[in-house]
Image (cartoon, helix red, strand yellow):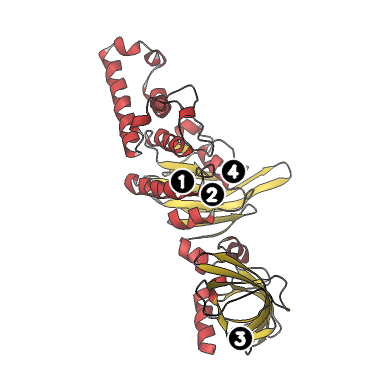
Amino acid sequence: MGGVEISRISKGYGANPVLRDVSLHVRDGEFLTLLGPSGCGKSTLLRILAGLETQDAGSITINGRRVDGVRPKSRNVAMVFQSYALYPHLTVAQNISLPLRMSRLKLWQRLPLARQLSASTRRLWRGIDADVHAAAGALDIERLLGRKPKQLSGGQRQRVALGRAMVREPAVFLMDEPLSNLDAKLRVQMRAEIKELHRRLGATFIYVTHDQSEAMTMSDRVAVLIDGQLLQVAPPANIYAAPADRHVAEFVGSPKINILDAKVIRRDLIAAAGTCLPIVSDLAPDTELCLGIRPEALKVVQGAGVGVISGHVKFVEHLGSDLFVHLAVLAARDPLIVRVPANHPTAIHPGDLLHVSPADDILVFDAGGRATEPSMDVARRFRNAG
C-alpha cells in the first residue's frame, strides 16, 4: 500500500513562489512522472514528499497517514538522487546494506566484531546479507558487490542507488532525475530497467524529469508542472493528443508544436496563417484564439486553396527516416515545422514554395491558453467540415 495524497501544497523562498497550490492524488502502485522545465518546482515537491523540505501550506498523506512534520526516515519512502549519493569509502554491498544496518541493528551490533558476539546478531547480519544479494541479483550487480563506487560506470552506480532503495521495501519510491548523468544509449536501457523494476515490485513510483521521452515511455500518468502550477495530469497519450493548456502542448512533443494566431470568421471558418481553415466552433465571430498543429499533422499538397497554408522553405533538417521542413509563412510569427517522410517523392530544397494542409488533429486554445474542447473532437469536426 503506497498511495500518496498531495493537498494544496505551496512553497516559496522569500518573495519567490516555487509551488502554487498543488494538489495531486497518486494511486497505490502507480508510476507517475512529474514533468516540467528546469526551475518549475518538481524537485522541490519531491523533496517535500521525502521530508527534506517543509511546505509553507498544504498537507501530504502517504498510505493513509498524514506525514506533515514526520522525519524523513519515518515516512516509509526511499529517494534515488540525481547524483546517486553513494559513499565512496564503502563497497557496493555496504552501500546497499546501509539502510538495513541502520534500521535493524543496534549501535554495538554494527561494530566489526559484533557478528561473533551472539547468535541473534549473526542471524540479523545473515538476513541483511540475504536481502542485499537478492536486490543485487534483481539488478544484475552481484559481481560488483566488493567494488567501490569509483570502480563503477554511471549505469552501475545508478543500479546500486536503486538497490539501496529497494532493500528498504518502501511504500513509495521517489526518483529525482536519476538518468540525467547517463549517456543517451544508457538512458534508453535504464528506462526499460526502471519500468521493469516497477512492474516486478508493484510499488508506487514518483519520478521527476524534464525529459519528455522518459515521461512518455515510462509513466502510467504524467503530471505537468510549469511555473509551480500543476497544469494537467493524464496518461502520456492524452497529454500529447489532448493537452489541456497551450503551455503543455508547447512543452510536450519534439519537434515543438506549431502555434498559430487565429480569429473566428464564422461558425465554420477560422482564419490563420494567411488562409481559412474549415473548423466548426461555437465561438463568436472575431474571437481571437490560437491553433496548435503538430508537425506530423501537416501534409504536403499540390497548390493553394481553402485550408492550405503556403510558405517558402527556410531550411531542411535530415533525421534519417524523417525530414523536418521549416517553412516561412507570411502571416505567422514563427516558421512552421512540417514533418515529412525522408522518402517523399518530391525533393524539398531551401527557397522552394511549399503548400501544406492540416490533415489531422488541430488543437484550439482560447486567449488565456486553455483548450476550448477535446482535440479529437476538433479533428473530427475539421474532417467533417472539409
The vertical placement of 238 against 102, above or below, is: below
Question: Of callouts 4 and 1, which one flags the residue occurring earlier in the amino acid sequence?
Answer: 4
Instruction: Identify residue for label 2.
Output: 209
Q: Residue at x 54, y 44 (%)?
A: 180
Question: Of callouts 3 and 2, which one flags the residue occurring earlier in the amino acid sequence?
Answer: 2
Give the quarter of the figure containing the N terminus: top left
State which mark lies toward you, 2 or 4: 2
Give the quarter of the figure containing the C terminus: bottom right
User: Which residue occupies the foreground of this view, 200 or 370?
Assistant: 200
Instruction: Identify residue for label 3.
Output: 307
Question: Is residue 201 something that shows in the picture?
Answer: yes
Q: CA distance from mark 4 to mark 1?
A: 26 Å
Instruction: Identify residue for label 1.
Output: 186
Residue 353: x percent and y percent? Answer: 66, 81
Give, as a three-letter code, the residue at label 1: Leu
Question: Of callouts 1 and 2, which one flags the residue occurring earlier in the amino acid sequence?
Answer: 1
- Neighbour class for label 3 at 10 Å: few (<14), some, many (≥20)? many
Question: Of callouts 2 and 4, which one flags the residue occurring earlier in the amino acid sequence?
Answer: 4
Instruction: Identify residue for label 4.
Output: 44
Q: CA distance from mark 1 to mark 3?
A: 44 Å
Give, as a three-letter code, the residue at label 3: Gly
| Tags 1 and 2 touching, CB below 8 Å | no
- Neighbour class for label 1 at 10 Å: few (<14), some, many (≥20)? few
